[in-house]
Amino acid sequence: MNYTVVLPAAGSGKRMKADKNKLLLELFGKPIFLYTLEVFQKDPNCDAIWLAVKEQERGLIENYVKRYNLTKVQGYATGGTERQDSVRACLEAIPPCGVVLVHDAARPFIDKEVIVNLVEKAHTSGAAIAAVPVKDTIKKAENGIISETVDRDQLWMIQTPQAFRYSLILEAAQKAHNDGFMGTDEAMLVERLHYPVAIVESTYENIKMTTPDDLIYGRAILESRLQ
Ligand code: C5P
């Protein structure tokens, strides 16, 4: 089943302790965001790739897209202050389609099978998000003292991609904006409209390149895939 992917790529390098957008940092000589783009370029079910970018980085990113022959990149939106603003700008820019996948450009190691499962689920039930079961024990603490140990059996660590029917996510994103609601993922915007959101089990490799240690894990994942 086919889909359009929206990739927010307009962040910074703050938590990465980098002096530029972390997506431009290289793993084995190639910027991080290109690994992500190539996953979708190679996926025969992906019809179109749209990117949210910072205005001042657009030229640079467009050059990479041309150089790497990423022909599925069909357009750009200008990113906003928060990730949610960047995603909404992109959703408002894309032509109407069946299923939209929202995926952090900072997650280059997404599994192809997970994408297939997400798109299928979004086609049938409207919304599906990638997640992995929590591995550690989770506790709540107040002023440094444990107040509760949470039962982890029902807990999931949520990732992207998050897949939605186009009309549903556009409505949810615009409503959140009009209401001044800020969520930490797209699913939250849909959940608040009382639409069900399905979980699709993903892989632990699908890390978000966020802090400097993620560069070490990222290199290790790439090396393991060469073997
Ligand atoms: O900062 P964080 O790692 O959570 O960002 C997740 C994704 O959202 C990254 O790909 C980043 O480039 C993007 N982003 C964005 N616009 C922002 C902030 C983050 O497109 N204002």
Image (cartoon, rainbow, N blue to C red):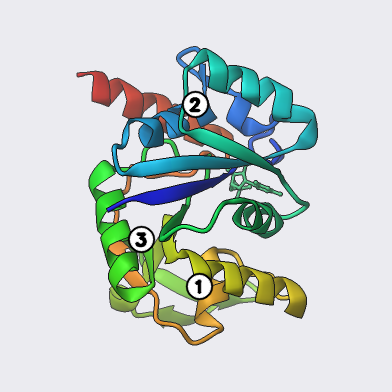
Q: Which of 218 and 33 lies nearest the eye of the viewer? A: 33
Image: 74 above or below 154: above
Q: Amino acid at mark 3?
A: Ala
* Labels 1, 2: front one: 1
Q: Amino acid at mark 1?
A: Leu
Q: Residues within 10 Å of mark 1 (few under 14, many from 20)?
A: some
**In the rendered structure, which disc, 1 or 3, sits on the residue that comes first in sequence?**
3
For mark 3, does the 10 Å Cα neighbourhood hold few (<14), some (14 to 19), or many (20 or more) residues?
Answer: many
Residue 98 drawn at (x, y percent): 41, 61
Distance from disc 3 to disc 2, alpha carbons, whole Å, reads 23 Å
Asked if residue 19 shows in the view, the reply is no
Residue 3, x across and y down, in percent: 38, 51
Q: Position of residue 186 (x, y in %)?
A: 54, 65
Name the residue rendered at 29%, 37% in the picture.
Answer: 44
Numbered disc total? 3
Q: At x 40% / y 24%, what residue is drawn?
A: 219
Q: Which mark is residue 34?
A: 2
What is the quadrant of residue 225 in the picture?
Answer: top left
Q: Nearer the viewer, mark 3 or mark 2?
A: 2
Taking the spot 55% from the left edge, 42% from the top edge, the residue there is 50
Q: Which mark is residue 168?
A: 1
Q: Is residue 163 above or below residue 191?
A: above
Vertical order, 182 against 36 (above or below): below
Front-most of 12 and 44?
44
Q: Residue under circle 3?
A: 131
Could you tell me which secondary element the residue under label 3 belongs to?
strand
Q: Residue at x 71, y 29 (%)?
A: 58
Q: Secondary structure at mark 1?
A: helix
- How many neighbours does mark 2 have within 10 angstroms: few (below 14), some (14-19), or many (20 or more)? many
Where does residue 10 sit, x and y in percent of width and height?
Answer: 68, 41
Q: Residue furthest bottom?
A: 194
Residue 38 appearing in the image: yes
